[in-house]
Amino acid sequence: MVNKKWEPHIITAVSLIALIALGLACASSPDEAPAQTGGPVSLDRAIGMAARSVEDNVENGLKIALLNFKSPTEQFSEYVLEELTSQLVHGKKLIVVDRRELDLIRQEEEFQLSDDVSDESAQAIGKKLGAQLIVSGSLSAVGNVYRFRIRVLNVETAAIEASPAMDISASEERVMFLLGGKGPIQVNTGSPQTSAAAPEKTSYKIGDRGPAGGIVFYDKGAFSDGWRYLEAAPVETEFTAQWSRSSREYWPALRSGIGSGKWNTEQITEAIGRNSGDERAALLCAKLNHNGFADWFLPSIEELDLVYKNLKLQNLGNFSNNWYWSSSVADKGYRARYLRFNDGRQYYGEVTNALPVRAIRAF
């Protein structure tokens, strides 16, 4: 018989054990997304959370194919799949199928990025690609927010390995642009009663104010590879920095073409570490957060040339007449390339020089 003076302590201990067991049970569910607090998150944050959830709930080293994302517009679906691919590649826990292989499959199967694909079709496609996992996703309107979902299907068993979901803001400028309109829209659910009219297309021209508050300086004519336009950050974000603190670094693989500045910046940032404390030009661009946008990068030399021709020569952007750093390097890989904004001359020099920097972004 239990002594009455110990009864309260025994009850408390039993309650604590029950609560701990309940917490462990909840934490063990493989389909739970990372906890979302404080309301809707940004689209990029949702993509990052989804990537981490996928990595945490599947076995490392498996081959994964990002098949499709159902949304109202092709460019929204393309953006999500491109950014999720980038996150998973950088995570280095899974083997991501090359998008070019998927494009061939899409042509054979005759479906688009924003189409719905059955589990049976997804499994068949996964087997063609030699993938163990297939990723699909969807966007749906829920009141004043959008519900963002990612689903990971096991190709062999058809089991759902992970299913992260979170709310994203319908008023985020990036989201509105990718959905082709200026305000929240209703996602077509297939029901005639709830389907909305196609949103009005949004377009930009050179010199327009971009979504992040910069100035648009390039339009490649169509949305592909996750972007169509380039915008330069406003003058108040400009800074002066060294390209590197050491002239001994060797960077032969960095590129020069239009569309390569982001890739260059990612290579530099990954090599030195985003949180290294290094204040070189590329890293400071990658850390820039202006108007809620944190996807800036150091332009390649050809992108910088477009900034000069389409903005500086048109008296737009408040650029100085100084040399500006690019993310490209000279042929030997030890010196970085820059461009002078008083005459457009391109050259290369010591990476330890401190020069003006203006970040750009793609959208």
Image: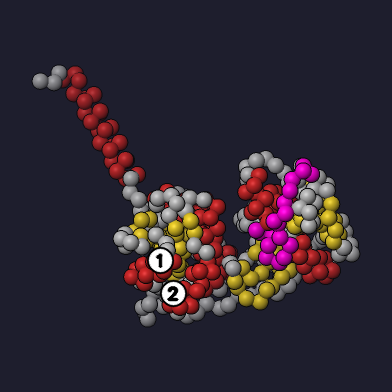
Quarter of the view holding residue 28: top left
In this view of the protein, which residue sits in the foreground, 220 or 109?
Answer: 109
| Residue to which mark 1 is pinned | 126
Would residue 290 be visible to someone looking at this image? Answer: no
- Which SS class for mark 2? loop
Q: Residue furthest right?
A: 343
Q: Are marks 1 and 2 in contact (CB under 8 Å)?
A: no
Q: Is residue 287 left or right of residue 331?
A: left
x and y percent of residue 355 in the render? 82, 50
Task: Give the amino acid type for the residue marked by disc 1 in the picture.
Answer: Gly
Residue type, mark 2 in image: Asp
User: Where are the magenta residues, as a range?
Assistant: 246-263
Give neighbour class at mark 2: few <14, some 14-19, many 20+ (Cα, 10 Å). some
The residue identified by callout 2 is 115
**Which residue of the protein is positioned furthest toward the left in this rendering?**
1
**Front-lying residue, 3 or 164:** 164
Q: Residue at x 44, y 66 (%)?
A: 129
Q: Main secondary structure of the magenta part?
A: loop
The residues bearing labels 1 and 2 have C-alpha atoms spaced at a distance of 17 Å
- Residue 345 lies, in percent from the top left, at 87, 63
Residue 166 coordinates in the image, percent (x, y)? 43, 57
Count residues near mark 1 (Cα–Cα under 10 Å), then give few for <14, some for 14-19, many for 20+: many
Query: Does the magenta run of residues contain 321?
Result: no
